[in-house]
Amino acid sequence: MLRRQARERREFLRLREQQQRLQRQQQRREQLRQALDENRLLPPELRREALKLQRELEFDPPGETEPGHHDDEYKWAGLEPPQVMVTTSRDPSARLRLFAKELCLLIPGARRMNRGRADLGALVGACRAAGVTDLLLLHETRGDPDGLSLCHLPHGPSAHFTLSGTVLRRDTGGRGGAPLAAPHLLLLDLDTALGRRVGTILKHLFPVPRPDSHRVVTFANQDDVILVRNHVYRRRGKEVELEEVGPRFQLRPYLIRLGTLDQGDAADVEWRWHPYTATARKQRLLASA
């Protein structure tokens, strides 16, 4: 089992490196194409291989700007509903346990597992053996949920978020504990490369909804903070009644690793939030405007 996992991990990393190399090559060809179309000087880093890139441009199909994704962690998404497991840190408070239960109601088909004394390696191994596709780990500080780690199995990625503004279902006046249908998803203002990446990680927690579903889950970006809202709606003639059922919370991504949670610092960092750089206040990471 360990040898097979190591072999699959090596193949996963090799295919991802190949994909990144193809993307860099395609970006250089696009830079050359734009320079030729605008009749301006070539960038210094392209002058040595300009002739080679120009020959490659002749074989590029028109309208195609990105190479095919040979390595996509979510290539089988939609064929089967995701299997999501929700757990907490050790010795969770009553509020964190209740929030974990309501998170299972937010995500259709999600199951909750008591953490006990199990370490991250045992958690990830048990979820991988049980066919779980995503593991959600909730953290808290003095009884207030303040962190969420999301691990896609079997090989990653792992996204880490700060969690704030938690409002439970009972506080929003929503419906009871009965599970609701698979929701339609709204991803608002997540139009940069990082925003699309975070949106892809979040949206694949949910199964494909039926067309007649009356539930909507919204991930709305506001100043690089993702507002998560859960609503149901009813049609009464030409009017639509909207009711929030909760829970309500806010997410802010700060780290994405190309690996699972049990690998820790050994996994490569795809993106990390740098809040203490000089231009951090001026940057918009998840939206282009």
Image (cartoon, grey):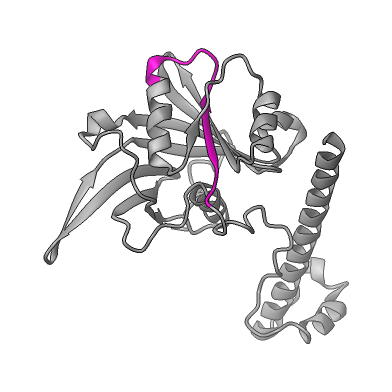
> In the rendered image, which quarter contains the C terminus?
bottom left
Please name whichever residue, 139 or 37, is drawn nearer the observer in this view of the structure: 139
**Res. 168 image quadrant:** top left
- What residue is rendered at 33% in x and 45% in y? 180
Q: Is residue 209 above or below residue 67?
A: above
Give left or right: position of 31 versus 281.
right
- What residue is rendered at 37% in x and 32% in y? 102
**Res. 99 image quadrant:** top left
Please name whichever residue, 43 or 33, is drawn nearer the observer in this view of the structure: 33
**Res. 224 image quadrant:** top left
Residue 235 at x, y percent in the picture: 17, 60
Magenta region includes residue 72 = no
- Write the start and end of the magenta stretch as one range: 81-95
Could you tell me how many numbered marks the image carries? 0
Residue 63 at x, y percent in the picture: 62, 82
Please name whichever residue, 274 or 62, is drawn nearer the observer in this view of the structure: 62
Residue 187 at x, y percent in the picture: 42, 55
Magenta region includes residue 89 = yes
Give left or right: position of 104 versus 64.
left
